[in-house]
Amino acid sequence: MVAQAPSGKKPLPDMMTSIRIDKSGQVEIVDQLLLPHSVVWIPISTPEEAFEAIKSMKIRGAPAIASLAALSLKSSLSRSSLTNTFSSTQQVVDWVKEQCDYLQSSRPTAVNLSEAMNRIRAYLQNVSEGKEEIIEKVKEICQDVHEEDLERNMQMGKLGADWLFAKRGKGNKNKLKVVTVCNTGSLATSGYGTAIGVITALYEHDQLDTAYYAQTTPYHQGSRLTSLELTTLEIPACMICDTMLGSLFQHEDIDGVIVGADRVVKNGDTANKIGTYQAAVLAQRHNIPFMVVAPVTTIDLSLKTGADIHIEQRPSIEATQVRGLNTETGKLSVVRITPEGVGEGDKPWQRVYNPSFDVTPAELISCVVTEKGVAERKEGEKAIDVASIC
Ligand code: MRU
């Protein structure tokens, strides 16, 4: 599927599509480690290849990794060289379950991936069909995981934009200034995006003044990817360093902070890209609405509070090195920004703390938006009833 540009406009350029599938069914991903400087497509045919691409963050973003994991299973099950080796239905079931466990272990925090794998497992629980039918049904579920993402993003975009617009003081005719962190657009999803979907919807309705986006170190999803998406779509935008949020809130009238999510638990606590929590604390201090936008597949009602969320730690090297374009040679390069040994040596002064996500307590969140609706936190309450929008 090709990601879509804002409604009515032409399909997005290649580099803004995280996953593409050609006529023969070959799945390819754009290597996000090389964006925005270089557009390189990598074929993905097996769960092993998908696992590596997800773990190394060649593809990232909660919905996109779930899509790729599912599509890699579908690709494998489309090859007779594999399916001919299954001599019984039990063998198919065992193989698929094993692959689901394996793919799920690639990144632990984003729940969309486990939700997708759980859907396949749930189907396999009580199968009575024959080998061929089971294979076809699993392939169908995998395709659904990928395809349903785009439509729900457009729905969330509309719901979120309407909510924020309604929040704006009556009589205030100014267009909105909003802030986002990380990358939640086409590259993180199957198209349109979650938080970026809301920003795009505001822009489409001529209600956006400026989308401020944080660089989002250490991986730079903001400066590399959100930057690429917003400049390509020509959406009025302004990059800020992560350290500038407080200053921005002091000096500009910001109408809302809009973020995506990797896991929203029962009480509304939300795990999202590192830096989201500090944005929420600052937003509350400045009385700015803080909105979480995520599909139902990101809601995990099995966990009661954010304290139960497993936070992925990333390798130190991702914080001590920066990848970019050497403007003198025109070549991509990786440079270390710390003294030698930091993050690699075992001395007490060489340690690096590098969690990939943080948890924002629901009491700092104004509302959660899914494709089914908007759940607002009631005045004075500490939790949000996310089950009502599942
Ligand atoms: O580590 P990443 O880049 O996969 O983290 C991505 C985020 O935290 C996004 O905000 C989240 O997945 C929502 S994307 C629609």
Image (spheres, grey):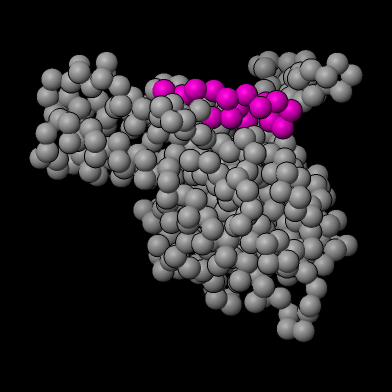
Asked whether 123 or 76 is in front, the reply is: 76
Which residue sits at x=54%, y=58%?
154
Task: Report the predominant secondary structure element of the magenta stretch.
Answer: loop
Q: In which quarter of the image is residue 242?
A: top right
* 44 inside magenta stretch: yes
Q: Residue 185: where, in percent of width, then height?
A: 61, 47
Q: Which residue lies furthest to the bottom in this view?
A: 171
* 341 relative position to 189: left or right: right
Q: Quadrant of the C terminus?
A: bottom left
* 255 relative position to 49: left or right: right
Q: Give the range drawn in magenta.
A: 29-45
Which residue sits at x=57%, y=65%?
158
Q: Residue 72, relative to residue 227: is it above or below? A: above
Which residue sits at x=10%, y=40%?
128
Asked whether 196 or 374 is in front, the reply is: 196
Q: Residue 293: where, in percent of width, then height?
A: 56, 58
* Residue 51 in sight: no
Q: Residue 206: where, in percent of width, then height?
A: 73, 66
Q: Residue 372: where, in percent of width, then height?
A: 44, 65
Asked whether 288 or 342 is in front, the reply is: 288
Which residue sits at x=86%, y=16%?
329
Q: Quadrant of residue 51?
A: top left
* 388 relative position to 248: left or right: left
Q: Residue 124, relative to residue 272: is it above or below? A: above
* 223 inside magenta stretch: no
* Residue 30 in sight: yes
Q: Residue 327, relative to residue 10: is it above or below? A: above
